[in-house]
Each structure stands twice: as C-alpha cells, then as structure tokens.
Image: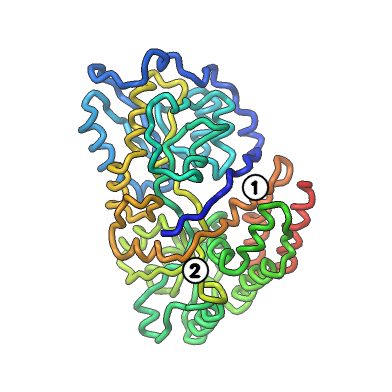
C-alpha cells in the first residue's frame, strides 16, 4: 500500500482536568531497570494490562491469541489482561498514581501521551532493546515524546470509508462510484428508489463525523494541507463545498430519520439490517459488520478525477505503554516488545482483519484488500484540527460538537460552517 508521510504533530494542551495531572512521584527512569533491561526468566510475576474498552468486541479474540502466545514464550510472566482502559479511567489512574503495569495509549494523535510523560507516569523504553527497524519515521514519531520511545509503534492504520450493502446495490442496479459526481448521483438514485442512502449516528459525537472524515480528502485535500502548514483558510472553496454537500444530503433526506436520537450501535444495526444502503465508519469496525452477516462491500470516496485518498490515522490497537511505577519494568517492557513484533501483529491481523501499515503483515482476506484499496493516504481532518488548536481554542471540539451536528440537522450551511472554524482559527493566531 502507499504510505503517506506525516509530520510530527504539534502537541496541544488537552482539557483542564488533564492539564492538572499530578506528578506521580516517580522519575521517568525507573530505578528497577538501572541494573539491566532483560526480564528475569526465573522470577514469577503477574502483569496487569489494560486494553481498549471501547474496542473490546473487536479486539478480544485477537488479544486472547496474542496473550496466550506471549505467555507460552514467557512462562514466568502471567498476564492479568482487562478491557478496562478508557480515557477517563487512564486519566484518573495517572492522577492517583494507580496505573496498571501496561496500558494502551493513543500516541501523538492526541496530547495525552505527552501529558502523561510530563507527569512522570510513563517509562521510557529506549533502553529495553526494542527493535524498531520495521517502522517508518512517521510510525516512530507516533510512539515518541521529545525523541524518546514510550510505546509500541503502530502496526495498523485506521481510516474512514464507506461500507455498503452489496445486496441492495445489486438489487437496485447501482455500482460503486468511480468519481465524486457519481458518489453524489448514487445517493440521489438510492433515495429516489425509496432507500435511505446513509445510516448516521447523530447522537454519537465522534461517529457522526465519519462521513466528513471520509469525504474531506476527496474534496479538500490541498486545502487541508495548507491549513496544516499555516497558510490556508477554512473559507477555501473546496472546504465550503464539502460542508455544503453534507448540508445538501441532510436537506434531501439522505440520512437516518431522526438521527439526533440514534447512537452508533443503532446506526450500525440499521445498516446491517438492510434499512440503509451505506454507512461511513472506521476500518476497525469491519469485523462488526462481517460478523453481522451483511453482504459487505467497501470503498473510499473518489475525487473528481477518480483517485481514492484515504484519511490516515494510525491505529492504537497495539500501541501499549508501561507505567513508570510498575514493580516489573523489564517484564512489562517485554510485553510491549512482543506487541511491536511481527508475530503478535500477524495474530492480530488474522483475528481482526485490520488494515496493516507494515508490508510484512499478510492481509487476512479479500475484505482487508478492499480496505487497503486506496491510491494514496491523505489528511485526517481531526489531526489537522488538532495541529492548529491551542489550549484556549480547541477547533476539534468546535468541529465535533457544533459544526457537524448543525450540518447534519440543516441548521447551518457550508459557508456558515466554514466561518465558524475560520473565526476560531483566527483566535489561535
């Protein structure tokens, strides 16, 4: 696959509760690791590990296989693996110095990991002989803070695209669009045939924005790049057009009826039950749809010329960090080292069908090949908004909490949406 080059994100401040993270009372270099960095094979230890609670249904079988393989290779280490990791739980554990030995982090896609490092909560991993030779610079940057490695680098990528019901497409005689104009026509044709084109979870803050995430690279990639570089404006005609397209879809009834009361599970169920033809969702939810039995198809929204640009975002599926307070730093680092290796990543791929970011991970099936069927990687709107945000002005919140819900419910048009973000951007100067 083509792999886009990303620049190291500017790490902006998060909410006040996180900014006030108390120092954990630990040096970032754990004294227990100063006399060596190899796990003692004769010492029986138990590690508590927090997995990603939000993705338990998608990841559980994978980590069952991974953890068994790790314990088979490390008989002296017992894993107490729990899907207990949420943003709130981890923030609270950092402040109260009660982190588990190992837990997942989201890398530099959010400011959190940097704040954890600044509070003394994370153990640097550079001295634990982590093999990072398989990773590119952008993947390594994801797992680093100020030049030090604090997590397993990402082996998979997330993206947002359109999932569609092949049975509905076949019955109605429509096909996957080859250009953006054909995408617009496809939605209109389905609506004319009495079919809801898109399931949209209007009640879910992040998930209701997936259509915009999926659409932006196909309509406004260069405009996003200029904003990221500090030379652009949200009043760029291509961004206005993108927002106006979403407003037009809302006006024409292309979205779930009464979407403001529909959560993510409800929108996904409507799609898998055949009540809508398409849903914009993340690549990580492919197993959810496959497991529901829908005759599933996948496509990235094409540009006017037919290029398919996928919004890039590294997956935190296997990006775990070690608490600086762990009593077993070498053993905990050994688990993170295992997650960063090809064996664990192939097990994850075999169970989940995630989209590999590394060439030596073999895609599980044809579905994964469809998820990888893009021509290039483009900007993720959330990452761009994060880059240009400040502690005082969080464009991410304005986008997710104001712009998107108001577009989906026809309260603002494309120009007004762009103006809201541009006004906020000017306040960051």
Q: Position of residue 339 (x, y in %)?
A: 35, 38
Badge 1 or badge 2: first in the primary sequence: 2
Q: Which residue is outermost to the front?
A: 133
Q: Is residue 164 above or below residue 20?
A: below
- Rendered view: 200 above or below 88: below
Q: Is residue 208 among what the camera can see?
A: no
Q: Which mark is residue 372?
A: none
Q: Foreground residue, 407 or 104?
A: 104
Q: Is residue 301 left or right of residue 130?
A: right
Q: Position of residue 292 (x, y in %)?
A: 32, 63
Is residue 422 found left or right of 199 in the rendered image?
right
- Where, by quadrant of the figure, is residue 180 drawn? bottom right
The answer to the question of whether label 1 and label 2 lie on touching residues, with beta carbons closer than 8 A, is no
Q: In this rendering, is residue 417 above or below 150?
A: below
Q: What residue sits right under mark 1 in the picture? A: 387
Residue 408: image location, x then y, percent: 61, 67
User: Gap between marks 1 and 2, in whole Å?
Assistant: 24 Å
Quadrant occupied by the N terminus: bottom left
Relative to 17, is 59 on the left or the right?
left
Q: How is the image coloured?
A: rainbow
Residue at mark 2: 308
Identify the residue at horizontal 63%, vertical 73% (top origin). 245
Q: Secondary structure at mark 2?
A: loop
Judged by depth in the image, the label closer to the viewer, 1 or 2, is 2
Q: Secondary structure at mark 1?
A: helix
Estimate the x, y position of residue 426 in percent, counting from the top left. Answer: 79, 52
Please rate how many residues cluster around mark 2, counting C-alpha atoms within 10 Å: few if below 14, some from 14 to 19, many from 20: many
Q: Name which quarter of the figure residue 133 lies in.
A: top left
Residue drawn 32% across the image and 21% down it: 38
Residue toward you, 36 or 314: 36
Q: Is 314 rendered above or below residue 219?
A: above
């Amino acid at each position: 696959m083509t792999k886009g080059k990303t620049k190291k994100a500017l790490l902006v401040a998060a909410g006040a509760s996180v900014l006030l993270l108390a120092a954990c009372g630990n040096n970032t270099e754990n004294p227990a690791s100063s006399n060596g960095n190899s796990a003692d094979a004769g010492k029986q230890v138990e590690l508590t590990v927090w997995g990603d609670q939000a993705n338990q249904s998608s990841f559980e079988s994978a980590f069952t296989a991974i953890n068994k393989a790790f314990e088979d290779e490390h008989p002296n280490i017992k894993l107490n693996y729990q899907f207990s990791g949420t943003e709130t739980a981890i923030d609270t554990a950092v402040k109260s110095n009660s982190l588990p030995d190992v837990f997942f982090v989201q890398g530099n896609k959010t400011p959190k990991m940097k704040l954890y490092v600044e509070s003394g909560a994370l153990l640097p991993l550079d001295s634990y002989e982590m093999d990072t030779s398989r990773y590119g610079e952008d993947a390594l940057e994801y797992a680093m803070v100020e030049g030090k490695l604090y997590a397993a680098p990402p082996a998979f990528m997330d993206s947002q695209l359109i999932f569609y019901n092949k049975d509905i497409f076949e019955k109605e005689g429509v096909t996957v669009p080859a250009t953006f104009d054909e995408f617009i026509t496809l939605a209109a044709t389905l609506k004319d045939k009495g079919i809801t084109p898109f399931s949209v979870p209007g009640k879910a803050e992040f998930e209701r924005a997936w259509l915009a995430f999926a659409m932006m690279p196909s309509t406004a990639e260069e405009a996003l790049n200029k904003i990221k570089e500090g030379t652009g404006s949200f009043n760029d005609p291509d961004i206005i057009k993108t927002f106006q397209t979403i407003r037009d879809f809302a006006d024409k009834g292309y979205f779930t009826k009464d979407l403001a009361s529909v959560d993510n599970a409800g929108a996904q169920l409507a799609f898998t039950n055949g009540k809508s033809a398409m849903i914009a969702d993340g690549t990580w939810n492919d197993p959810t749809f496959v497991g529901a039995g829908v005759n599933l198809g996948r496509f990235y929204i094409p540009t006017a010329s037919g290029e398919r640009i996928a919004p890039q975002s590294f997956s935190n599926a296997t990006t775990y960090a070690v608490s600086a307070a762990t009593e077993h730093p070498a053993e905990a680092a050994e688990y993170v080292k295992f997650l960063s290796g090809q064996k664990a990543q192939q097990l994850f791929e075999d169970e989940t069908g995630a989209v590999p970011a590394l060439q030596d991970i073999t895609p599980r099936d044809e579905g994964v090949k469809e998820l990888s069927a893009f021509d290039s990687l483009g900007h993720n709107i959330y990452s761009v908004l994060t880059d240009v945000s400040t502690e005082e002005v969080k464009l991410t919140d304005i986008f997710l909490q104001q712009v998107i819900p108001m577009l989906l419910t026809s309260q603002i048009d494309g120009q007004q949406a762009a103006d809201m973000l541009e006004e906020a951007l000017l306040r960051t100067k």
